[in-house]
Image (cartoon, rainbow, N blue to C red):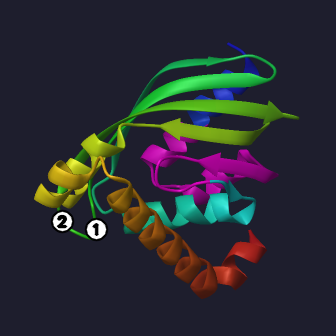
Amino acid sequence: MHPNAELIQKFYVAFGKKDAVTMGTYYDPAASFSDAVFINLQGEQVTAMWQMLCARASDLRIEYSNVQADELTGSAHWEAWYTFASTGYSVHNKIDANFRFKDGKIIQHEDNFDFWNWAGQALGTKGKLLGWTGMVKKRVRAQAVANLRGYLAANKQTLERK
């Protein structure tokens, strides 16, 4: 197995344990992350996002499969089961991840999932009816960015030490 495939596996094992600190060690300090909610996070924002999500996830369960990687790129499929903290609704999200590597670390990470399906689960009826609209995406993204900014502000010293 290629070392970068092992890195992806270690990443998801740590995620399953809600060990965001270990997850952060697999990223290059200049790494970027994007998905349908968090767009173009950079550097410490990436590790802070995972720390915030793991801290809020009381019942998170992760499964991963189809891990593939070479020297420069990698991919995996992963699924997450959790309660969405803002609404209390249960979510089962199916995600395809793509990675780029630099010097044995993740330099770019992109997660792709069906936002409308996720919104229907996480937001309930409103998400089912309007989750496909730009308005709902914009509102969810704005709230996610606000949450991350608040988390960063509250945890700045802790993040700098890691």
Which residue is under mark 2? 88
Q: SS of the residue at dot 1?
A: loop
Q: Nearer the viewer, residue 135 or 15?
A: 135
How far apart, in angstroms, are the residues tagged by discs 2 and 1?
5 Å
Q: Nearer the viewer, residue 88 or 132?
A: 132
Task: Give the x, y percent position of residue 120.
Answer: 20, 49
Whether the magenta-drawn stretch holds residue 112 is answered as: no
Location of residue 156 (image quadrant): bottom right
120 displayed left or right of 69? left
Of all residues shown, which one is farthest toward the front? 134
Q: Nearer the viewer, residue 154 or 130?
A: 130
Location of residue 7 (image quadrant): top right
Residue range of the region highlighted in magenta in the rendering: 11-39
Q: Is residue 81 visible?
A: no
Q: Residue at x 65, y 54 (%)?
A: 40
Which residue is under mark 1? 85
Screen quadrant of the N terminus: top right
Q: Is residue 142 above or below residue 123?
A: below
Q: Residue at x 71, y 45 (%)?
A: 26
Q: SS of the residue at dot 2?
A: loop
Q: Residue at x 67, y 79 (%)?
A: 158
Q: Residue at x 16, y 60 (%)?
A: 126
